[in-house]
């Protein structure tokens, strides 16, 4: 599989994972042994907490954000307190744009590609993808990167 195809498959998987995490759809698993199919069936609301109590929709950050550039293998770990709020957290908002909850971003993985979709360092890239992960390596979001040259 070519890098461009892998990137496309990763983007599709990320979209499905994000939709599932946000409760918008789930993957239907057949019980008759046939192949599974994707479904846009809404999920039931999740319980608020294990004890039935409320869950803090704005938890504190666990401490650090790790950034990895795949093309170079470079990794940098920065205390979350040194980063802007929109880098440390991914927010969900209501229809009016009001922040409803947030998830801590603890890892950012940057895949950068040249015009031939070959993996290259960001300074030589024309496009890319940044994948944001939360605690437990839970994928939160993929963001397309367009580098201006």
Image (tube, helix red, strand yellow):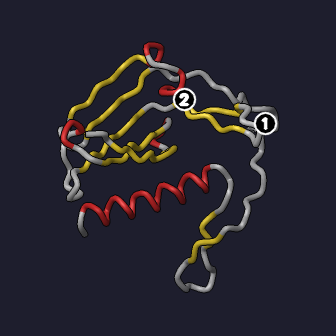
Residue name at image x 50 percent, y 45 percent: 141
Picture coordinates of residue 61, whole percent (x, y): 54, 23
Q: Give SS at disc 1.
A: loop
Picture coordinates of residue 98, whole percent (x, y): 73, 32
Q: Which residue is mark 2?
A: 89
Residue name at image x 73 percent, y 62 percent: 42
Image quadrant occupied by the C terminus = top left
Picture coordinates of residue 36, whole percent (x, y): 55, 77
- The mark that comes first in sequence, 2 or 1, is 1
How many residues crowd mark 2 within 10 Å: few (<14), some (14–19), many (20+)?
A: many
Instruction: Name the mark nearer the viewer: 2 or 1.
Output: 2
Residue name at image x 54 percent, y 29 percent: 89
Q: Which residue is mark 1?
A: 51
The vertical placement of 55 against 40, above or below, is: above
Residue name at image x 50 percent, y 26 percent: 88
Q: Residue furthest front?
A: 149
Image quadrant occupied by the N terminus = bottom left
């Amino acid at each position: 599989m070519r890098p461009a195809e892998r990137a496309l498959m990763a983007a599709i998987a990320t979209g499905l994972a994000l939709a599932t995490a946000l409760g918008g759809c789930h993957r239907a698993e057949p019980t008759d042994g046939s192949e599974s199919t994707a479904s846009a069936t809404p999920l039931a609301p999740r319980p608020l907490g294990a004890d039935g109590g409320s869950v803090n929709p704005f938890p504190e950050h666990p401490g650090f954000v790790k950034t990895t550039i795949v093309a170079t293998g470079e990794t940098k770990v920065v205390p979350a307190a040194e980063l802007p709020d929109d880098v440390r957290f991914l927010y969900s908002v209501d229809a009016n744009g009001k922040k409803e909850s947030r998830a801590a971003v603890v890892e950012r993985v940057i895949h950068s590609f040249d015009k031939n979709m070959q993996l290259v360092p960001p300074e030589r890239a024309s496009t890319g993808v940044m994948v944001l992960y939360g605690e437990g390596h839970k994928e939160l979001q993929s963001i397309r990167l367009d580098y201006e040259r």
